Amino acid sequence: MTNASTARDGQQAKERGADTLDAVIIGAGFSGMYQLHLLRDRLGLKARVIERGDGVGGTWYWNRYPGARCDSESHSYSYYFSDELLKEWEWSERYPQQPEIVRYLNFVADKLDLKSDIQFETTVTAARYDEAANLWRIETDAGETVSAKYLITAVGCLSSANVPDIPGRDRFKGDWYHTGQWPHEGVDFTGKRVGQIGTGSTGIQAVPVIAETAQHLTVFQRTANYSIPANNHPLSAEFKAWARENIDEIRKTMHTSTNGHPFLIEDRKVFDVSAEERREIYEKAWEIGGLRFRAVFQDILFDKAANDTAADFLKSKIGEIVKDPETAKNLAAIDHPFATKRPPIDTGYFEAYNRDNVSLVNLRETPIVEITETGVKTTEREYDLDIIVFATGFDAMTGSLLKLGIVGRDGVSLNEAWVAGPRTYLGIQVVGFPNMFTITGPGSPSVLCNMPVAIEQHVEWITDCIEKMEKEDIDRVEPTEPAVANWVDHVNEVANATLLPEAGHSWYLGANVPGKPRVFMPYAGGMNRFRKICDDVVARGYDGFLFTRDRADSRTETVNA
Ligand code: N01
């Protein structure tokens, strides 16, 4: 399989003692699995993945809520490092459902024999940098401490569930669930009065499915949201053959595109065309469905007037679909420009409100006061419920990292280092945390990109960096403070050049978690541009990174300045 497996017994690995690993990777989703494969099978290093769940899948292992489906098209939601894997796996639908993604990741894990080096059902409780030994000491809830030169976090951007601290939450006598911690055995809504809080991408997917069996579903909406039909459908034999035969072309498009999707953003601007033509373009994009809608004009995310045309079109669609005028009005009362929050795509979301057993509560008009023993109480009335579903999102991008108990040089924790918000260089490394790499960390395109594309780029970059270190006997790498400062400025600058910060309550800004610093976290400059920046950094001798080596006289020398 791939050139990666040829170096399984590579010599670069230093002997670091039988109980010391070269690398510990935290998390067995898309990123941790690929990182394990490259470190173990390409570099020949001793690497272990530590994973909380009892199986691979990461985000998709936990997010088993009704209707869970990816919004990247399945033929692009795959590893592209191996043609063999691509040819052997067949997706069944345009957008893959959660169980199929987990099956896919198990297929890859088995094919690459990854599970033997994944320690399941183990939670990392702390990771401390031991400066004298230049090792990370990783503690787990199994009571063991594992030591490794490299610590690589592959914990995903949307893995730390945000369950809002609504007064009375613990008093509720019925059952409640967060969509990101869904029971593996599923939840039976038959004949139940269900309340769902949250109408982000998750909530919008869950509503139509829960509505099918619940006696009644009450949706509590705080911020109204745009949604575009997924137009999901089974993939034809022709399409599957086309995808298999055009791997290079598809990969090239994904690597060239701004968001890592298998389509490019059109060059034309909104006001380059007449109002009539624009309407036709939007109509056609609505029919095609999915995130391609956002790509029909290049200035939707940059020019408010341009954005308004898309926003108005999408709001008008809500009015056309939803029969009850009051419900339609509340659903269309959207307060932010289109695509400034992650645009959900749906299967029958707005249509669900035409069912007799679905109703909407506009929390902007009647906010939740408390959760009672029997339901949810707003300023207007109490709703009796058997089940509450929290589709309330995540402590995104930093939450899962900060939970790991990471402590760097001089005893400074990551929580202390990021007290005013995350500061990284390229989303990959943090000052004061030598040899720690964060795959798709804050400051990288990650969530603004088709994730596997962002993940492959980061994992390959990290692997190349570690390979250099192992070949050249380098002991440490970490970024310089000026490089981090410049990068943080650049991340802000590119975000501020877009309309993205206008969604003031978005999780991109950390605004959904009380007390979290408001910092625009993902890199909005585009995946293609980011890839080039990372390549240029390497071409300039890892500009902005400091490599150091311990000498025999126990002094430390700088390998590059
Ligand atoms: O979370 P969200 P999500 N009282 O934060 C509401 C990815 N994803 O899980 O907007 C009442 O977007 C909150 O209201 P408001 C994707 O990147 C992908 O839906 O803060 N309401 C909002 O409506 C996505 O963006 C896929 O006012 C409260 C909702 O809960 C990301 O995951 C599928 C509340 C949270 O929306 C997160 O999506 C699913 C409170 N106290 C997810 N607190 C696909 O691939 C929060 N809310 C398709």
Image: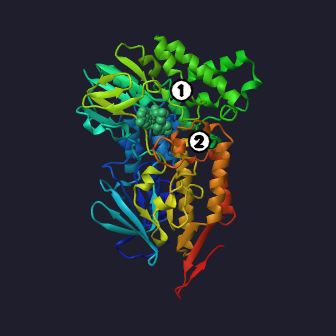
Element type at mark 1 = loop
Is 559 placed above or below 223 here? Answer: below
Q: Where on the picture, by quarter, is residue 268? A: top right
Give me the disc on residue 522: none
Say which of 538 and 382 sits in front. Answer: 382
Residue 69 makes an appearance in the image = no
Q: Residue furthest toward the front?
A: 379
Residue 369 shown left or right of residue 546 in the figure: left
> Within 10 Å of the Cα at label 2, are there few (<14), some (14-19), or many (20+) other Cα atoms?
many
Identify the residue under disc 2.
260
Question: Mark 1 sits on what residue?
Answer: 226
Quarter in which the C terminus is drawn? bottom right
Decide which of 407, 248 is in the foreground and name it.
407
Q: Residue at x 65, y 73 (%)?
A: 560
Q: Name the amino acid type tagged 1.
A: Tyr
Residue at 25%, 28% (x, y): give it: 374
Q: Position of residue 20 (x, y in %)?
A: 38, 72
- The answer for how far apart the CA atoms under marks 2 and 1 are is 22 Å
Q: Within the image, what quadrant is residue 104 found in?
A: top left
Name the outermost residue toward the right: 272
